[in-house]
Amino acid sequence: MSRSAHPAGPRHADVLPEGHYSAPAADLNALDEKVWSRTVTRDADGALTVGGIAVARLAEEFGTPAYFLDESDFRARCRAWADAFGPDADVFYAGKAFLSRAVVRWLKEEGLNLDVCSGGELTTALDAGMPAERIAFHGNNKTVAEIERAVEAGVGRIVLDSFQEIVRVAHIAQRHGVRQRVQIRVTVGVEAHTHEFIATAHEDQKFGIALADGQAAEAVRRALSLDGLELIGVHSHIGSQIFDMAGFEVSARRVVQLLAEIRDEHGVELPEIDLGGGLGIAYTSDDDPREPHEIAKALSDIVTRECEAAKLRTPRISVEPGRAIVGPTAFTLYEVGTIKPLEGLRTYVSVDGGMSDNIRTALYDAEYSVALVSRTSDAEPMLVRVVGKHCESGDIVVKDAFLPADLAPGDLIAVPATGAYCRSMASNYNHALRPPVVAVRDGEARVIVRRETEEDLLRLDVG
Ligand SMILES: *Cc1c(COP(=O)(O)O)cnc(C)c1O
């Protein structure tokens, strides 16, 4: 199979030899700023510090494993996205990447909006004081109870995902005597993964309503005909961990084409389009993500050009980055427990967490980096696989990486770029206690999500 033929890009396992890994970095003690949060550095003793606090102190106070979130980095990324898109566009943080009440307050203070996709996320957002009009509600199978709560709360938009939902939301809104602002999620036939994308006529997936065969046009027709709905725009989300803007280009072109068809058929120009999230981050030094201002300019240029060609007013653009905001802001800190050298293969390094705090490696074959952080070392690099303590051989945190050969039990190692889809996807497998999230800022560390306890486990188990 040729490399370019693979839709998921050349870095996927089936086009590279098993056990492919990059060469060790020239200096294993160096911290690549692409993969570590902004305030991470090493102190005079060689220990990693974040927000001015050394990891040994963090481990002592909060235990391991734990996620440490660099709050000033999170806030700076929010501001960078808001500034890049400016007052004529909207940035919605995708709460599913990681959501807590502290995060909601930071988003609110930094001027971002928020995407939720479940009753639980909606509750968290409202409880922490996010104004309902700044919340968008997503999901391919929202329950009637969830829709009721969203409508009652007055969320700014509900993103309609199916023909059934168009009717459900319209009914509920009408019962509440309101016109609910909605967008229709369309699938544009673009599949984006990592470094490549493919454009297809149809998409074989559960989300949205297909542009193909006039499905989306029919959904628009129905939404426009229902009193309970105010159709404000069209939504498209094409994938995740995307580096190549070409996928967004095809998506934007197809969405604008639909807006032109809507104008021609109904005489209305919908005022908004949402191009979704999915912007990639650096998990390893091999990844080269784009800056928010480059992404904003690229998206705005594409939409403006397509609208000019279709003689449409340029709609207000919104985007929904999750990973690109929170992903790089946190690392997971682990203590090394056992070390097993397998002659001629690699060395297995077992840590005190695993697939219960980071399922992405097992689930998506995700790549991560790792560093020895409690000290520096001049020892030779050794090829390692960082594994957890779960009863499963797929319990891998970092598949292939290099750590110094003098690594010893008791050393602290950290996996960067674990802010997104790690705590939010964490599980209690093997009755593991889900780790805390600790926010660190200007020399202060505070727990924003506490560690689970054995009492928490027993409380759910009613005997
Ligand atoms: C998951 C998701 C996002 C966020 O994706 P990231 O890869 O975290 O940026 C945005 N919009 C929708 C509709 C999603 O499902």
Image (spheres, rainbow, N blue to C red):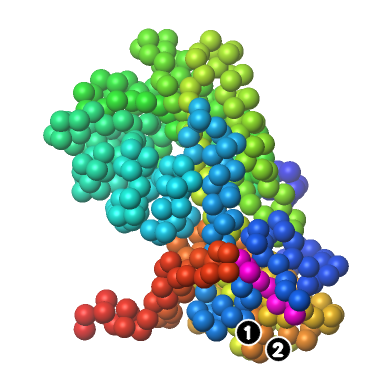
> Would you say the residues marked 2 and 1 are in contact, meaning their CB atoms lie under 8 Å apart?
yes
Q: Main secondary structure of the magenta part?
A: loop
Kindly identify the residue that appears in the image at 51 percent across and 21 percent down: 256
Secondary structure at badge 2 equals loop
Residue at 41 percent of width and 34 percent of height: 185
What is the crowding at mark 2: few (fewer than 14 residues within 10 Å), some, or many (at least 20)? some
The residue that appears at 21% across and 48% down in the rendered structure is 145
User: Can I make out residue 205 in this image?
Assistant: no
Q: Which residues are magenta?
A: 45-52
Q: Quadrant of residue 302?
A: top right
> As shown in the figure, which amino acid type bears the numbered disc 2?
Ala
The amino acid type found where label 1 is placed reads Val
Residue 326 location (% of width, % of height): 54, 55
- The circle drawn on residue 418 is none
Q: Is mark 1 within 8 Å of ligand 1?
A: no
- Where residue 100 appears, as percent x and y from the top left, is 40, 59
Queried whether the magenta region covers residue 48, the answer comes back as yes
Residue 58 occupies which quadrant of the picture? Answer: bottom right
Question: Could you say where residue 370 lies in the image, as x and y percent from the top left?
Answer: 68, 70
Give the residue pinned by disc 2: 408
> Can see residue 103?
yes
Crowd rating for badge 1 (residues with CA inside 10 Å; few <14, some 14–19, many 20+): many
Please tell me whether residue 260 is drawn above or below residue 203 in the rendered image: above
Q: Is residue 198 left or right of residue 218?
A: right
Q: Which mark is residue 336?
A: 1
How far across and how far down the image is residue 119, in percent? 29, 52
